[in-house]
């Protein structure tokens, strides 16, 4: 009995830990009014999500995202968790703007360009002495296709996502043009679970998505 009690306690402690790790912080962007569920899988990276109102029953294909990272290097997320064969988003500050590049990797080397039909448009971005941050709409970003055979998706109706993150302190090479830049391997990386609850879906989604009007391409 004693054994089972301690086993139960250990299991409960474990569950607690997992929940703590996934703690969601609600953040409202004051300029746009967009409300995000945010997760900070690392002290250097915060990721926020806002989803269409029916995303918990019908798989969303798009989202409004926020990424805030420390420093002046670059950071990224993987929509499917792992680096390989999932849609990747690379983000970095450049000349006061925040540039983005959708990428695809088949191995743990410099990811090439994503060639599917995802579309990213920005609501706003901010760069200061310690952080860079971008709020964006990503259409066709919860499903992906690279070439003719590589297809994948995540299901928001399952009630959680497993996302990947990475963080680098060095700036990309050729940073003026996001589609031709090069990066070295990130310094830190990992996976995190993002439980999707009623708080992450919003009837205001269409109005918020309509604010994502900026196509920020850099100088290519
Ligand atoms: C030259 C460029 C890159 C190299 C050499 C590289 C290499 C690696 C390696 C070796 C790992 C495994 C680390 C470990 O398990 O200890 C890893 C993980 C990861 N990378 Fe990269 N990476 C690069 C660029 C990127 C980019 C651009 C992104 C996203 C925008 C990214 C996202 C991730 C994520 C999310 C993980 C953790 C999940 C996983 O292990 O699959 N990486 N990377
Ligand atoms: C810089 O931006 C970050 C993230 O947006 C914010 O938390 C921080 O307070 C800002 N710092 C200053 C000095 O404005």
Image: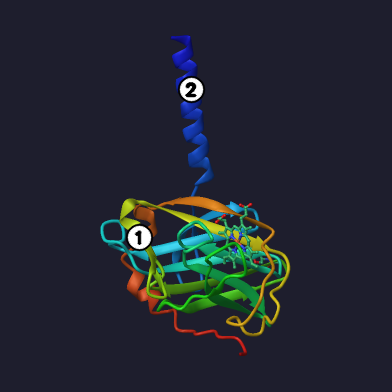
Left or right position of 91 against 140: right
Q: Quadrant of ligand 1?
A: bottom right
Residue at image position (35%, 75%) is 207
Quickly name the residue at label 2: 9
- On-image quarter of the C terminus: bottom right
Q: Residue at x 56, y 76 (%)?
A: 100
- 138 w.r.t. 177: above or below: above
- Location of residue 133 in the rendering, given as x and y in whole percent from the top left corner: 59, 69
* Secondary structure found at label 1: strand
Q: Report if residue 29 is visible in the image.
A: no
Where residue 129 sits: x, y (%)?
A: 73, 70
Instruction: Confirm if mark 1 falls within 8 A of ligand 2.
Output: no
User: Does residue 158 sit above or below 103 in this rendering?
Assistant: above
Residue 141 located left or right of residue 128: left
Question: Which colour scheme appears in the figure?
Answer: rainbow
Residue at 38% in and 59% down: 154
The residue wearing badge 1 is: 201
Which numbered disc, 2 or 1, marks the residue closer to the eye? 2
| Mark 2 neighbour class, 10 Å CA radius: few under 14, some 14 to 19, many 20 or more | few
| Nearer-the-camera pick, 127 or 93 | 93
Neighbor class of circle 1 (other Cα within 10 Å; few <14, some 14-19, many 20+) is many
Q: Earlier in the sequence, mark 2 or mark 1?
A: 2
- Report whether 183 appears left or right of 142: right
């Amino acid at each position: 009995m004693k054994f089972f009690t301690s086993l139960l306690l250990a299991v409960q402690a474990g569950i607690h830990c997992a929940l703590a790790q996934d703690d969601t912080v609600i953040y409202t962007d004051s300029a746009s009014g967009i409300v995000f569920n945010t997760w900070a899988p690392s002290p250097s990276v915060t990721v926020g999500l806002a989803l269409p109102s029916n995303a918990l029953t019908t798989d969303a294909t798009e989202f409004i995202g926020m990424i805030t990272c420390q420093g002046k290097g670059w950071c990224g997320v993987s929509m499917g968790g792992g680096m390989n064969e999932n849609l990747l988003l690379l983000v970095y500050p450049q000349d006061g703007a925040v540039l983005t590049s959708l990428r695809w990797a088949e191995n743990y080397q410099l990811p090439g360009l994503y060639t599917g039909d995802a579309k990213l448009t920005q609501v706003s971005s901010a760069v200061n002495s310690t952080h860079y941050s971008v709020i964006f709409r990503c259409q066709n970003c919860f499903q992906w296709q690279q070439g003719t055979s590589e297809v994948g998706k995540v299901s928001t109706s399952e009630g959680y996502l497993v996302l990947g993150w990475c963080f680098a302190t060095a700036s990309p090479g050729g940073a003026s043009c996001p589609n031709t830049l090069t990066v070295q391997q990130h310094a830190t990386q990992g996976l995190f679970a993002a439980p999707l609850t009623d708080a992450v879906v919003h009837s205001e989604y269409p109005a918020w998505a309509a604010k994502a009007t900026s196509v920020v391409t850099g100088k290519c």
